[in-house]
């Protein structure tokens, strides 16, 4: 087909489906309708750096549980643990009928980020977690093991949304399924609640709202409260309240040796520092005291979406870059790329959305610069409340973003500004990926422009989260439906990295939000370039997890 024919066809298609597109976009933006037609809309996400980290001195051999997989699960484990744990706990073996209902992950990619288990433990209390970890540490040493002491490797899972590629290194190990730790206890002054380590966003947001409260949670309802927060925790309200991690007043943690401790500013302060940014490395958090805020102060959100064809990319991100420089704490700017064949069969479209926490009258000036770009489509201004944002952005449990995938990986990164030429390069790679590998055409790019006032009000040194100064979070999500196809998976990884690397442009230091990292990023990219940060994290890792029991997700190599 000639270029001319393609163009004509696209033009035709466009006018034919114009009505359909409008309906589609309205549908996307509608908070009340379910989404039968449009699967993949907004998904928050993001990482990886690689290349240009400053050269570092040779490091000692990493202590890493993933590299010492010699263990066996004792055949008596079910009886052993049943005796040790509370009656409300549950221990499942692969032969148990319900085993598979606890192994599902958001990405069930066996090649990269889906572990396999020989046993699943569902603790009902913190002592259950302690006893489970102690058992795992002291059992599972096979006869005649010569390579030191190896317990059963384990992984705590809560929302099962991690896509880090080290996760699949856990083969035949133990899942500590924390979802039954669902405590929710409100402080008398209404300023905090004790929240169980097993809660998901979808448990927390409506329950708080029913009491007139809200707080920073992940934007997607399906992720856990703590999976995001332990790595920082981005969400709609961060500009007003700070990150998820910033809401944690104290945490109960079961350490690698099974000892349960409390961490706060006054108890185990070093651990408390590490938990807020590098938390997946230090223990299983069974509950946290978490800050709450009155939801009635600004109950309303107004939002509007704008669709552009790819030729407008430069215009669109110039505007994004400009408005970001004077971003209200009440505004979140989102932008995404995806293929909508009804609009353009080969070029993914760009959809930007402005979310404003306040009435439409106040929001109008934030909408105006995008509306002025003369988008292909502009939705009406819609309003909702904090719980309703999940529907507005299509981040409910039933939406595409939350639905399980055969293979999905987030390639995430943090940058300081929209580098327009770099985004063009990145977009072109994204488009080329879909042309070359149609199996990847459901992939989505998320450019997340959260506000930062309250995030940056927290002193930079005071937590392990090292990316407070970064303005923007990008998440390139590659996904496909054919499980276990190595060729396809290799292609997805090649393209994912290419798209992400292009978007970095010429940045001096690459940063990558740990929860959007893929697994090939440098430790500096995720945890900060300052040597004091790296040294402190390594020292704390040696102190709290000397054997590297927490090694399957963004591990700190001590
Ligand atoms: C669809 C989607 C939407 C997302 N939205 C957001 C978002 O809005 N904001 C954001 O910041 N990030 C977001 N992320 C990234 C998210 O932070 C990570 O995927 C995170 O790992 C999810 O945690 P989880 O508990 O759901 O997953 P899991 O895979 O269960 O856990 C991930 C890691 O966290 C550890 N972990 C989980 N619970 C505990 C606990 N109680 N104690 C100790 N360790 C624990 C696990 O051991 C594992 O290492 C999103 C990801 C996806 C796929
Ligand atoms: C989970 O917790 C509830 C309430 O504490 C309890 O009744 C149940 O037995 C627990 N176990 C499982 C596997 O759900
Ligand atoms: C920044 O935004 C505020 C609020 O909309 C506005 O009053 C102010 O003039 C803006 N400043 C600049 C430099 O654009
Ligand atoms: C695996 O994916 C590749 C790339 O999409 C495709 O060409 C190949 O046919 C697939 N293999 C199988 C066995 O389906
Ligand atoms: C477990 O580790 C912590 C942190 O290193 C330590 O303080 C504690 O004494 C250890 N507990 C046991 C029983 O060894």
Image (cartoon, grey):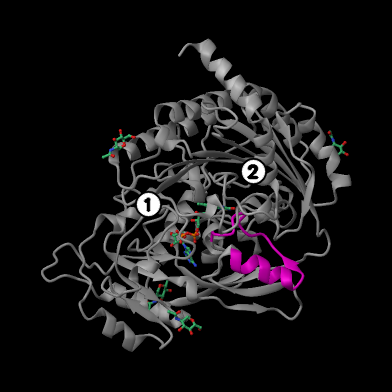
How far across and down, in percent of the image, does residue 486 sit? 29, 41
How far across and down, in percent of the image, does residue 77 sit? 26, 79
| Position of the N terminus by quadrant | top left
How far across and down, in percent of the image, does residue 41 sit? 59, 44
Please give the range of residues in magenta.
202-223
Gap between marks 1 and 2 measured at Cα: 29 Å
Relative placement, left or right, of 416 versus 347 is: right
Tell me the residue that label 1 is attached to.
Answer: 113
Residue at far left of view: 144
Would you say residue 197 sits in the magenta stretch? no
Residue sitting at x 72%, y 68%: 209
- Front residue of 16 and 133: 16
Residue sitting at x 29%, y 50%: 61
How far across and down, in percent of the image, does residue 485 sit? 30, 42
Residue sitting at x 37%, y 52%: 113
| Position of the C terminus by quadrant | bottom left
- Front residue of 529 and 525: 525
Local SS, label 1: loop
Residue at far front of view: 16
**Residue 131 can be seen in this image:** no
Tell me the residue that label 2 is attached to.
Answer: 469
**With respect to residue 409, does 155 lie above or below?**
below
The picture quadrant where one finds residue 215 is bottom right
Q: Residues within 10 Å of mark 2 (few under 14, many from 20)?
A: few
How many numbered circles does the render carry? Answer: 2
Local SS, label 2: loop
**With respect to residue 83, does 543 lie above or below?**
above
């Amino acid at each position: 087909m000639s270029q001319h024919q393609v163009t004509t066809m696209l033009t035709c298609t466009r006018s034919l489906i114009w009505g359909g597109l409008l309906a589609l976009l309205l549908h996307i933006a509608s908070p009340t309708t379910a989404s039968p037609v449009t699967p993949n809309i907004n998904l928050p996400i993001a990482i990886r750096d690689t290349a240009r980290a400053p050269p570092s001195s040779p490091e000692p051999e990493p202590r890493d549980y993933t590299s010492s997989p010699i263990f066996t699960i004792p055949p008596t484990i079910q009886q052993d643990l049943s005796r040790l744990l509370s009656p409300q706990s549950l221990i499942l073996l692969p032969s148990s009928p319900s085993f598979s209902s606890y192994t599902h992950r958001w990405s069930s990619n066996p090649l990269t980020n889906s572990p396999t288990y020989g046993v699943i433990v569902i603790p009902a209390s913190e002592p259950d977690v302690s006893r489970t970890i102690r058992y795992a540490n002291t059992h599972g040493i096979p006869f005649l093991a010569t390579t030191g002491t190896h317990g059963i490797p384990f992984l705590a899972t809560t929302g099962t949304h991690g896509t880090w590629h080290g996760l699949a290194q856990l083969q035949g190990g133990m899942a500590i399924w924390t979802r039954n730790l669902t405590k929710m206890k409100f402080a008398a002054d209404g300023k905090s609640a004790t929240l169980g380590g097993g809660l998901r966003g979808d448990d927390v947001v409506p329950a708080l709202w029913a009491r007139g409260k809200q707080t920073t949670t992940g934007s997607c309802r399906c992720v856990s409260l703590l999976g995001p927060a332990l790595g920082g925790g981005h969400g709609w309200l961060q500009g007003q309240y700070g990150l998820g991690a910033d809401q944690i007043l104290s945490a109960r943690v079961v350490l690698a040796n099974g000892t349960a401790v409390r961490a706060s500013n006054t108890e185990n302060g070093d651990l408390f520092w590490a938990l807020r940014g590098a938390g997946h490395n230090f223990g299983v958090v069974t509950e946290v005291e978490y800050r709450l805020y009155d939801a009635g102060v600004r109950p309303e959100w107004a939002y509007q979406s704008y669709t552009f064809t790819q030729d407008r990319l430069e215009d669109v991100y110039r505007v994004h870059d400009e408005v970001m420089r004077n971003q209200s704490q009440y505004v979140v700017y989102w932008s995404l790329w995806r293929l909508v064949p009804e609009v353009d069969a080969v070029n993914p479209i760009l959809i930007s959305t402005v979310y404003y926490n306040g009435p439409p009258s106040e929001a109008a000036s934030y909408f105006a610069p995008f509306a002025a770009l003369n988008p292909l489509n502009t939705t009406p201004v819609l309003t909702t409340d904090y719980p309703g944002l999940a529907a507005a952005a299509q981040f409910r449990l039933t939406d595409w973003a939350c639905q399980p995938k055969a293979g999905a990986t987030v390639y995430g990164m943090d940058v300081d500004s929209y580098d327009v030429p770099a985004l063009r390069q990145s977009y072109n790679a994204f488009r080329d990926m879909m042309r070359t590998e149609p199996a990847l055409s459901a992939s989505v790019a998320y450019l997340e422009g959260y506000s930062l006032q309250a995030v940056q009000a927290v002193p930079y040194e005071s937590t392990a989260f090292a990316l407070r100064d970064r303005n923007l979070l990008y998440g390139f999500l590659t996904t496909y439906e054919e499980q276990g196809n190595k060729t396809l998976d290799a292609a997805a990884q090649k393209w994912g990295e290419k798209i992400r690397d292009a978007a970095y442009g010429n940045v001096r230091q690459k940063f990558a939000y740990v929860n959007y990292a893929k697994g090939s990023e440098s430790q500096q990219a995720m945890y900060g370039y300052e040597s004091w940060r790296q040294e402190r994290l390594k020292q704390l890792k040696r102190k709290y997890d000397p054997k590297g029991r927490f090694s399957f997700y963004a591990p700190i190599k001590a």
